[in-house]
């Protein structure tokens, strides 16, 4: 276990972060380069004002027509994404590892709060799963890959929860937790989890088109 | 809403038994290899990061579904949802790397041409701002390159190509029609002229070809308004007078470019300050947004003023004396291309309130209004698809019905496609409402010479 | 009422005194967490003599180190001090915080020796 943990938290962590950061940069740069090569007109229409107008509306709960039309989903989506990011970034145990490895540290969440947030993320994943299976319009456009990416996102939280509470065999779940987190990081640039990278760009472009040309709201 | 006279079974049969030579013959000439070549040619060379990013970013959440009138009108059957339609077309092409069987192209062409109006309402619903209309347009482009396009709309594209207008209006028919309308109108407005080829006029007035073809009274009305408001205007006597563009909707971008260039160049030849266009939505999209871009102009090379905007200007400056406001309560339909695509929602309301005593808002309205289900070339696919078209917009009938219960008697629809589409809906669902253009109302209530 | 309070308070202090007085290296079972205001994890398990026997540690200053100007003084040792006497709750200059010092001392050595617990829950056992 000692060696396995050393390996997953050492070299594998490097691999995961390199894939995540390198992959993300590659995907974004490749996209921009292709726009420049084949659709440079897109840059002509980009407007900072309308990009921000669009992005800000869509990252604010209930600020858009469609968010208001789907209150339950809106709450779940926002709570999910907030917990998904805040929990691992501000988790004491994670910051401790950053501190030990790189001598950098920042504000952390109380463990009890992080524990609740973890449960929320898992519950939200379940909500999305149930929605995918039961809602006709979602089921119709669901592919196996949709379940896979949902699983990729849920896994670090599920294993993290079990490891934190030290249920069942602690070292196994601890190692699985690290692995699951690394799989998620590495998967972001190469799966449709890349909406994390691309959505600001697609939003900004649509916002600009609607603001500059169509003079109406895209939210 | 009374039940339609035809039984549902009869209708179903009729809906499924569509015979369309444009599709049937086109498909008979296809092979999987040819399809593969064309799809990959379009996807690899004509599209780029935009399409890729849209496909890779879509998280399959289905949140666009309820934006679509097709989906809402078919008991929320997911095959009609925007993302459902992208799944059955573009995703399928990507998944199969372009190797679709000829019969699979039939479904693609049906969806792209007759089950999506490119109204772009779903663009406002997608949390990521994915341009679903663009994806469906690419499906149409592929169908076009495969030589599979519904016959009726393909015919209009042919007409554009040959005669530079949508309706096969021949060279002499055009000035003849204008002179005929001038003559008619001079009975009512003795000094009225429809100035042809007047170089240096302030405005070139352009219309869609169906106006001279079978709605010539609209030209009469426009001339009457111009005369009353004392506008320095002109119309071209030769090609370039038609602002419509069905090629844009068949994915025939090359012809779209030709007809838009001809339109712009005519305005430049006449040295006018701007182009004012009649109450048409798709033409506005073509001249203001799409065609100019294909030609390399980021914005139209000459200011484009839609009729709503023009009437707004005239009414604001009190240039049209009104005898008496329109009495019957009206409701205002917001056409996608000029409202969602042109931001004229408040000007449209200004005009409506300036002309009418009572304006009843339908809900949803402004840029969130439901589509008419005729635009985007769907009505131009002709009679074979009429039943599907009206049945696919039950939600519009409900929306109009609701406005009617609050008193609205007349629907104002400042767009030709919407106008025709709403007329079909009103007839099918027995709505008993009148449909008018702004121009109809202005002409009706303005002061005329004794 | 007042009398009752006095008895309770008295009993509390007595208990506290007994706990403190009996604590010595031999009986030590965990790292004393009392200095932490709001500990997030259970106290780290640490059986002093058992640990040293297993690890084969003879010299006190293997763990009870002394640093001066950032340099380890090889022949000095600090077992007569509490760790918190030097290490504050927050890091100061080169001096790591108490938490980090504990982690560095235990986990750091375990990693080097390729033995002993290195995952959070292996020391902070629930």
Image (tube, grey):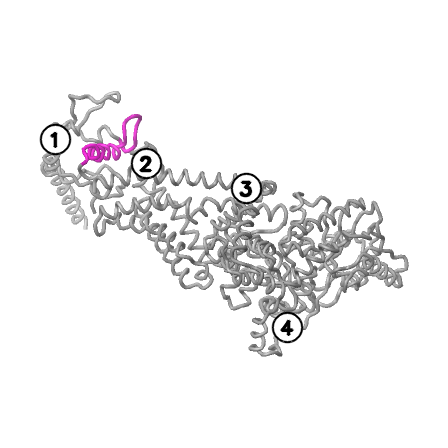
Q: Are marks 4 and 2 in contact (CB under 8 Å)?
A: no
Secondary structure found at label 3 = helix
List x then y, in percent, for residue B286. 67, 52
Secondary structure found at label 1 = loop
- The subunit carrying tag 1 is C
How far, Cα to Cα, is label 2 from label 3?
37 Å
Circle on res. A35: 3
Mark in front: 3 vs 4: 3
Residue picked out by circle 4:
B428
Secondary structure found at label 2 = helix
Q: How packed is label 1: few (under 14 Cα within 10 Å), some, or many (20 or more)?
A: few
Residue picked out by circle 1:
C57
Same chain for mark 3 and mark 4? The answer is no
Residue picked out by circle 2:
A98
How far, Cα to Cα, is label 1 from label 4?
93 Å
- Between C2 and C54, the one lying in front of the other is C54
The stretch of residues the image draws in magenta is C88-114
Picture layout, residue B438 above or below residue A186:
below
- The subunit carrying tag 3 is A
Q: Is residue C58 left or right of residue B179?
A: left
Mark in front: 1 vs 4: 4
Residue B115 seen in this snapshot: no
Residue B37 seen in this snapshot: yes
- The subunit carrying tag 4 is B
């Amino acid at each position: 276990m000692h060696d396995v943990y050393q390996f997953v938290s050492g070299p594998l962590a490097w691999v995961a972060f390199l894939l995540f950061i390198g992959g993300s940069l590659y995907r974004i740069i490749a996209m921009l380069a292709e726009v420049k090569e084949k659709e440079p007109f897109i840059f002509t229409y980009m407007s900072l004002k309308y990009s921000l107008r669009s992005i800000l509306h869509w990252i604010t709960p209930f600020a858009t027509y469609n968010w208001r039309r789907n209150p339950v989903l809106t709450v779940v989506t926002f709570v999910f994404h907030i917990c998904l990011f805040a929990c691992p970034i501000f988790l004491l145990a994670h910051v401790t590892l950053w501190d030990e490895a790189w001598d950098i540290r920042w504000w952390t969440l109380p463990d009890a709060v992080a524990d609740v947030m973890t449960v929320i993320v898992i519950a939200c994943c379940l909500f999305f799963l149930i929605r995918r299976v039961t809602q006709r319009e979602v089921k119709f456009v669901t592919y196996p890959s949709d379940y896979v990416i949902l699983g990729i996102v849920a896994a670090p939280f599920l294993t993290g929860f079990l490891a934190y509470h030290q249920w069942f065999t602690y070292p196994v779940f601890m190692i699985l937790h690290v692995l699951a987190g690394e799989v998620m990081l590495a998967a972001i640039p190469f799966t449709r989890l890349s909406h994390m990278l691309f959505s600001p760009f697609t939003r900004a472009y649509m916002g600009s088109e609607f603001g500059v040309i169509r003079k109406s709201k895209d939210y | 809403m009374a039940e339609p006279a035809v039984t549902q079974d009869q209708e179903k049969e009729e809906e499924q038994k569509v015979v369309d030579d444009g599709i049937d013959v086109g498909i008979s000439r296809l092979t999987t290899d040819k399809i593969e070549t064309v799809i990959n040619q379009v996807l690899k060379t004509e599209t780029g990061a935009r399409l890729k990013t849209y496909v890779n970013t879509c998280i399959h959440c289905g949140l666009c579904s309820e934006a679509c009138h097709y989906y809402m009108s078919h008991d929320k059957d997911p095959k009609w949802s925007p993302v459902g339609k992208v799944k059955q077309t573009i995703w399928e092409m990507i998944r199969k790397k372009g190797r679709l069987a000829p019969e699979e192209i039939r479904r693609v062409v049906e969806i792209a041409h007759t089950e999506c109006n490119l109204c772009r309402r779903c663009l406002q619903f997608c949390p990521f701002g994915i341009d679903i209309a663009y994806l469906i347009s690419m499906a149409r482009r592929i169908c076009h390159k495969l030589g599979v396009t519904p016959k009726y709309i393909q015919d209009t594209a042919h007409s554009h190509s040959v005669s530079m207008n949508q309706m096969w209006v021949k060279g002499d028919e055009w000035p003849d029609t204008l002179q005929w309308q001038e003559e008619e109108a001079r009975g009512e407005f003795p000094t009225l002229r429809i100035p042809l080829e007047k170089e240096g006029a302030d405005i070139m007035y352009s219309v869609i070809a169906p106006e001279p073809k079978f709605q010539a009274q609209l030209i009469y009305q426009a001339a009457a308004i111009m005369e009353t408001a004392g506008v320095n205007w002109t119309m071209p006597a030769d090609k370039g007078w038609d602002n419509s563009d069905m090629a844009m909707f068949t994915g025939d971008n090359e012809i779209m470019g030709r007809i838009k260039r001809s339109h712009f160049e005519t305005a430049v030849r006449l040295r006018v300050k701007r182009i004012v266009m009649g109450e048409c939505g798709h033409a506005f999209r073509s001249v203001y947004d799409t065609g100019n871009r294909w030609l390399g102009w980021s914005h139209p090379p000459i200011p484009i003023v839609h009729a709503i905007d023009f009437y707004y200007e005239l009414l604001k400056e009190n240039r049209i004396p009104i005898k008496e406001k329109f009495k019957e309560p009206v409701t205002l339909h917001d056409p996608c291309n000029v409202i969602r695509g042109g931001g004229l929602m408040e000007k449209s309301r200004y005009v409506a309130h300036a002309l009418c005593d009572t304006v009843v808002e339908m809900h949803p309205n402004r840029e969130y209004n439901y589509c008419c289900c005729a635009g985007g070339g769907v009505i131009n696919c002709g009679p074979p698809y009429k039943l599907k078209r009206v049945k696919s917009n039950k939600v519009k009938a409900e929306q109009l019905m609701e406005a009617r219960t609050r008193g609205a008697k007349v629907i104002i629809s400042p767009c030709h496609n919407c106008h025709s589409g709403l007329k079909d809906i009103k007839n099918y669902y027995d709505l008993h409402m009148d449909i008018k253009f702004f121009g109809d109302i202005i002409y009706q209530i303005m002061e005329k010479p004794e | 009422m007042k009398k009752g309070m006095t008895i309770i308070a008295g009993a509390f202090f007595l208990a506290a005194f007994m706990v403190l007085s009996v604590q010595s290296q031999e009986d030590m079972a965990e790292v004393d967490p009392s200095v932490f205001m709001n500990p997030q994890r259970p106290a780290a398990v640490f059986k002093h003599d058992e640990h040293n026997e297993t690890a084969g540690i003879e010299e006190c200053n293997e763990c009870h180190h002394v640093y001066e100007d950032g340099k380890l003084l090889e022949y000095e040792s600090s077992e007569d001090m509490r760790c918190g006497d030097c290490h504050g709750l927050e890091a100061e200059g080169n001096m790591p915080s108490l938490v980090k010092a504990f982690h560095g001392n235990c986990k750091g050595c375990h990693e080097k020796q390729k033995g002993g617990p290195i995952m959070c829950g292996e020391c902070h056992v629930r």
